Image (spheres, rainbow, N blue to C red):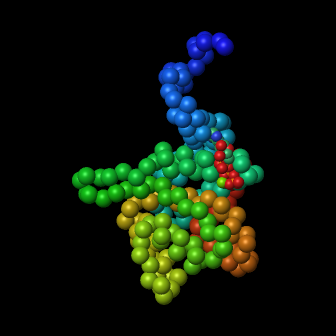
Amino acid sequence: MNDEVSHLTAGAAALLSETNERRIRTIRSRRWVLYPRAKQALDRLSALLDHPRGTRMPSVAIYGDSGMGKTMIMKRFRDEHPPSFNPLTGTLKTPVLAMEMTSRPGERRFYAELLTLLGAPQRPRADIAQMEQAALRIMEAIGVQVLVIDELHNILAGSYREQRIVLNADSEVNRPGIPI
Ligand SMILES: Nc1ncnc2c1ncn2[C@@H]1O[C@H](COP(=O)(O)OP(=O)(O)OP(=O)(O)O)[C@@H](O)[C@H]1O
Ligand SMILES: [Mg+2]
């Protein structure tokens, strides 16, 4: 066997002396490769973060075949903008909130999922308007600037009317997007 390690990065070379378990664990761990399209998508998403608040906020749709890296981009974006604690105000700011579209569509399920993600207790008989108000209020309070929704295609399982309602709730998701 060739013991030459000069082609390895310092991090990879350091792993050579680790136990098999640790090396296997490292090999299996999530890895991030920045390819040009991913960078483009991350840049577009970051631009949303700086967008001033208005009545019609912009949105971006990222579409591509299964396994092309959409979820990875979303997670990367979230990890690049983690929640931060402001010691002056004593509040936690969450710039990016990532959720997965529920497998069965519908406005109620959408807001229920969002409220669960926000850690908000839900009244079992709350109507949709109350759920929407609660979700918007909490998102404003914790400083959410971008809401990322994975598996958005799940809304296709709904009727045309349900699709329009959920798309409306998500702002203008049906705008031109970024192919991956
Ligand atoms: N930027 C990346 N760096 C490293 N590995 C990646 C990257 N993007 C994708 N992969 C690999 O490809 C796999 C599939 O990517 P991902 O789950 O993001 O696809 P997807 O587009 O969300 O698919 P689906 O539409 O089925 O949800 C990941 O588990 C990962 O192993
Ligand atoms: Mg995915």
Residue at the location (68% across, 78% down)? Answer: 162
Say which residue appears at 36% left-offset and 51% top-offset: 84
Left/right of residue 167 with respect to residue 125 in the rendered view: right
Q: Position of residue 149 (x, y in %)?
A: 59, 60
Q: Residue at x 50, y 22 (%)?
A: 17
Q: Nearer the viewer, residue 136 or 158?
A: 158
Q: Position of residue 41 (x, y in %)?
A: 62, 45
Is residue 90 visible in this depiction of the protein? yes
Give the side of residue 131 with respect to residue 63, left or right.
Answer: left
Quarter placement of the N terminus: top right
165 in relation to 125, above or below: above
Check the image and report above or below for 64 versus 18.
Answer: below
Q: Where does the image place residue 172, in percent across and percent down from the top left? A: 62, 65
In the orientation shown, which residue stands out farthest toward the left? Answer: 88
Say which of 9 and 51 sits in front: 9
Horizontally, residue 5 falls left or right of residue 81, namely right
In the rendered image, the residue lying farthest to the bottom is 125
Percent coordinates x, y for residue 76 in the rendering: 54, 45
Q: Residue, x 55% and y 49% (percent of image)? A: 75
